[in-house]
Amino acid sequence: MSSKRWALAGGVILAVSLATPLSSAAAAAEPAPQSASPSVPPAVIDAMERDLGLSEAQVVTRLANEERAAATESALSSQLGGSYGGAWLNADATKLNVATTDAAAAQAISARGAQPVVVQRSLADLDAVKQKLDQAPRKAKNSATLWYVDVTTNTVSVQAPTVEAAEALVAAAGVDRGAVSVAATAEQPTLFINIIGGAPYYIGSSRCSVGFPVTKGSVQGFTTAGHCGRAGNRTSNPAGTFQGSSFPGNDYAWVAADSGNTATPYVRGSGGANVTVRGSTQASVGASICRSGSTTGWRCGTIQQHNASVRYSQGTVTGLTRTSACAEPGDSGGSFISGNQAQGMTSGGSGNCSVGGTTYHQPVNEALSAYGLTLRTG
């Protein structure tokens, strides 16, 4: 890794669609989240340069824009209430689009420096459609590959090996056909677990990757993927015991480490350098994201959708985030991080890091809440 600086990421504002800078009033209304750090770790810069084709200056600018977008998205989702239709960044993260079913809310969106988009369905409406798909008969779901809320098109996308198979799930779920888009896909998601063995931790002869170091009271441990082990399973390197595991349905677990192991606030970055975790604010659709795993190391991409349901051969997992970062077997359970904010643990995906692929992660905040865990931050 080249000798990068810790680059300052403050003071760069999010532009609106006409390249008009945010007003000082809008900027003052949306301070950066308290949990975010003003610095960009060198490992993040290196990996984003490699995987997203950015210069160092573009990385710093993008991360600053994404941090601001997350704060704006959070504020507007609360302000708009039932009319909120979701939010997404454009390709270079210079514009935050915020959807609403209420045309009268456009002015409030613009006042915060975002681009209003008037849509037919609210995010709650789309989530309700997806929930019906999640609850469809198992036979119908087994014919599909994945389904997710796509805020950029204001629909729920259903993908399967054939359009007919996707339509079959839509029909079985009894959802409004106008709220759904269907497509054929060649994706065949599989879980990133490896029987070969290796670092950083084992479950018997299987290998997975540490997600995020956590504590529960005085107990130290880490999150990982639920498909990596069941409650009571022992791990080695580090040694510990699975305390809870949820898979399928979800794909999260946590391991209590044996005495002598210390949970740190770090994720292994590019070239083995540590990236410090500062919090767990969810990043926007379109934001950059990097993942760390024991097979392919540090890889970056962008967030494509939140709240995706993915059918693996072992069962369907809901509430996953879909990304363009690649991964391979053995990376399961590993960390997904956007800037310095923890996002989730690697679940599965398709493709590989030679030809590229799609990878899904289980949001970390759900696991923290389910088990009463505290994320280690620095």
Image (cartoon, rainbow, N blue to C red):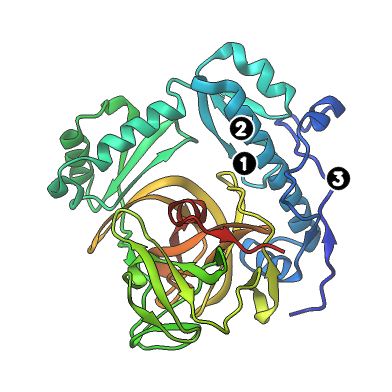
Look at the image and tell me in which quarter the N terminus lies.
Answer: bottom right
Report the Cα–Cα distance between label 3 and label 2: 21 Å
Which of the marked residues, 3 or 1, is nearer the chain's N terminus?
Answer: 3
- Asked if one can make out residue 245 in the rendered structure from this viewpoint, the answer is yes
Q: Residues within 10 Å of mark 2 (few under 14, many from 20)?
A: many
Determine the image quadrant of residue 174.
Answer: top left
Which numbered dot is residue 97? 2
Q: Amino acid at mark 1?
A: Asn
First along the sequence among labels 3 and 2: 3
Q: Is residue 60 above or below residue 319?
A: below
Three-letter amino acid code at disc 3?
Answer: Gly
At which x and y percent is residue 122? 45, 24
The image shows residue 332, relative to residue 308, as above or below, that is below
Return the x and y of residue 85 as percentages of the image width and height.
Answer: 50, 27
Q: Residue 90: give its label.
A: 1
Asked if the residues shown at circle 3 and circle 2 are in contact, with their CB atoms under 8 angstroms apart, the answer is no
> Count the marks: how many?
3
Q: Position of residue 334 (x, y in %)?
A: 50, 70
> Of circles 3 and 2, which is in front?
3
Disc 1 versus disc 2: nearer the observer:
2
Kind of residue sitting beneath label 2 = Asn
Secondary structure of the residue carrying tag 3 is loop
Circle 3 crowding by C-alpha within 10 Å: few under 14, some 14–19, many from 20: few
Give SS at disc 1.
loop
